[in-house]
Amino acid sequence: MIVVTGATGNVGRPLTRALAEAGQQVTAVSRTAAPVPDGVRHVTADLAEPSSLEPALAGAKALFLLLSGDLHAAGASPADIIGQAVACGVRRVVLLSSLGVATRPFGSTRIALRGVEDTLRESGLEWAVLRPGGFASNALWWADSVRERRVVAAPFGDVGVPVIDPADIAEVAAACLLDDRHHGGVYELTGPETITPRGQAEAIAAALGSPVRFHDLTRAEARAAMARSMPVELADDTLDILGSPSPAEVRVSPDVRQVLGREPRPFADWTARHVAAFR
């Protein structure tokens, strides 16, 4: 059995579906009850309380570990989840980390994630670490404004990074969970090309078949909006990357191709599949 945390999110949902379609027994974990594919067991648990995972982990051979933003807050102990997995007899953990662990290692959220990575390496488990950059699905932040006013409002409109389709992250995660060859792998996951927020607005407009106006937010405006859904420090880290990406953060990684044998999906592909969210 494979346990997927964050199973109702942008990565966990397609991962759960892919594993089930591959004939695996899957336990989907989320904080609240949610629909899951046929044949998938669902367990509610709060990762802030690692002991609450015990019913999900009992009998599991592998765990996909996705840590939500609040698990990086002061006082949180996400590394304890690794100990819980060991105690329950899990043999393999695939951790969703962040590219920022390598590119900006001294931010508080990056330090916390690096601590989880180190705990996993030292656990005696089989493991793989996925380090994605920006997510294509972050464009869903604009869904309401596009539907209501045909406007995308974002900071740093002409600064591009190679955002990754969460479906590609899910496919790489599935490969790492199922294939022994990925034990000890650290994969940096990006899309196939850099794209600016203005370029993303143009892709959304093309998918809709109607114009979408771009409005450039100040950093302060963007920070205030992001802080409503994530810790302020994580918002600041994200804005640092979006505003002044380093050469490593604009680099297109070969790792999706290395694992999956194909190029990562471009942002336009993600937009075409999710255009209904913007109509």
Image: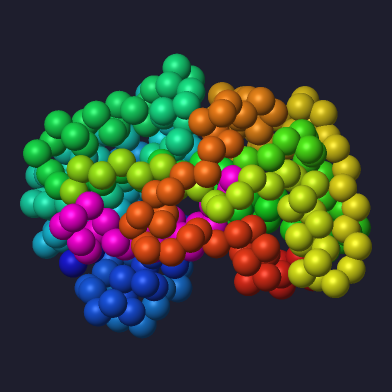
Q: Residue at x 74, y 53 (%)?
A: 200
Splitting the image into 4 quarters, where does residue 143 fall?
bottom right
Pick the front one: 270 or 234: 270
Q: Is residue 85 above or below residue 34?
A: above
Q: Is residue 235 above or below residue 136?
A: above
Could you tell me residue 47's position as x and y percent? 34, 44
Q: Residue at x 58, y 36 (%)?
A: 250
Q: Is residue 238 left or right of residue 51?
A: right
Region of the chain picked out in magenta, as a range: 162-182
Q: Is residue 52 above or below residue 111?
A: below
Could you tell me residue 112's position as x and y percent? 37, 26
Magenta region, main secondary structure: helix
Question: Is residue 99 among what the camera can see?
Answer: yes
Q: Residue at x 81, y 57 (%)?
A: 202
Could you tell me residue 268's position as x and y percent? 67, 63
Q: Is residue 242 above or below residue 274?
A: above
